[in-house]
Image (spheres, helix red, strand yellow):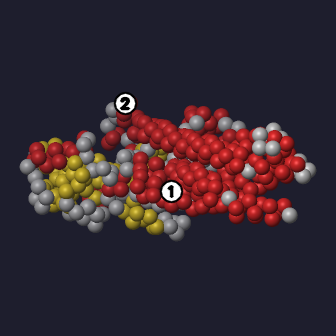
Amino acid sequence: MFGKMIFGVITRQKKKLMLIALTVALGVSLATAMLNVMFDVGDKVNQELKAYGANLNIVPKGAAFINDMYQLDEDNQNEASQFINEDQLVKIKMIFWAYNIVDFAPYLSIAAEVDHHPVKVVGTWFDKHLQIPTGDEVNTGMLAMKSWWQIEGNPMTDDNLQSAMIGESLAKRLNLKIGDKITIDSPKNHNSMALTIHNIFHSGGIEDNEIYVTLSTAQELANKKGLVERVEVSALTTPENELARRAAQDPNSLSRNEWDIWYCTAYISSIAYQLEEVMPDVRVKAIMQVAESEGAILQKTQLLMILLTVLSLICSALAISNLVTANVIERSTEIGLLKALGASNSAVALLIIIEMLIIGLIGGVIGYFMGLGFAQIIGHTVFGSSVEIKMLIIPLVGLMVLFITLIGSLPALKMMMFLKPIDVLHGR
């Protein structure tokens, strides 16, 4: 009997109830889209920010800071303390957070001359294919990390051993263009090398006065085979909090539980710590301006998503409240008759709630799939890629439907409880 009553109400008032379902669907669709984007936005925002530079810098532990402080002559120091072995760089992709390392590129700088003009020559990986001992294969290099550079000509590759990229300012000063031949002299190392200008680039920074060559070319020119000076690393990170800042100061100050949480979270400090674990002869410094900017942008973006979700649910609940109240007023005679026949307030309230939950469920299912579509539109429009569907959203959608349906029905239920059968049945 109870089921027949619910079925009868739904079939008799299907237009009005479908309007309620549509209201639920619109609210749930926006909330679903925002939640899917919010759960995926961390990686998306980080990926976007990776295009603007590295957030970690790896340098040799020994000489780098001593040279800066005391200006010691590098000839008086052990070469191994001034450079990093190139063969060790694959270990960067062997830490716990290896998949958070997006790109990295080593550098070797040389003071040289071109036509008796002093220049800085920098060797690097442009697009290096690496075989990782774990069995993975990765492509990494400077071009991916400096994607904002405006490069004239075809991209450099690590096979262009006789070619060079030259900065725009230096090219203008030396009156060079693509295809010209230059001879790079390294008086200190008593080496010279003839190269062809393969690219002219504009970076907007001091790099516009530099020449970039393959790492092996720079190593040959500097007599530093298999060595690099520093490595820039671009990593996806979690915004820093108090725990991460304490760990950055002294990891040993953490309790065992705090240490486990910190180590197993992709804080920039924990990634730096893990890199130093696998490469004990280096020091890893976080570029905090980049890391903190990423964290601030990510937190504000996620907060915006949460606010939009909450506002959409509140608006849906208010709209449903008006629609359900109007529905109860229209059915006041029916409700009064039920009460006159002995139905209690709780029984009538249960009837209305079940009706609304059924309609809300229909609207929630429609809204969920609409929200998935909206999420993909946002992903492709804002980030240029699809948004990963999170299964966690499904139970959240169920809770959202329950929330907006119950909250929206409360005013109508309150009105129903004070409805007197004698007044309704007499038309008062």
Locate residue 325, reporting x and y percent.
Answer: 69, 44
User: Which three-letter amino acid code belongs to the residue tagged 2?
Assistant: Tyr
Locate residue 293, reporting x and y percent.
Answer: 45, 38
Front disc: 2 or 1: 1
Residue carrying label 1? 375
Quadrant where the N terminus sits is bottom right
Residue carrying label 2? 70
Locate residue 246, reporting x and y percent.
Answer: 60, 33
Provide the secondary structure element on which disc 2 rests.
helix
Locate residue 102, reporting x and y percent.
Answer: 45, 55
Which image quarter: residue 77? top left
Residue 90 visible in image: no
Residue 335 visible in image: yes
Query: Which residue is drawn at the image coordinates 15% and 60% (left, top)?
Result: 196
Query: Which residue is drawn at the image coordinates 36% and 56% (left, top)?
Result: 144
Of residue 388 and residue 161, the one placed in the foreground of this image is 388
Q: CA distance from mark 2 to mark 1?
A: 55 Å
View extreme (right): residue: 342
Provide the secondary structure element on which disc 1 rests.
helix
* Residues at discs 2 and 1 in contact (Cβ within 8 Å): no
User: Which three-letter amino acid code belongs to the residue tagged 1?
Assistant: Ala
Query: Which residue is drawn at the image coordinates 44% and 52% (left, top)?
Result: 47
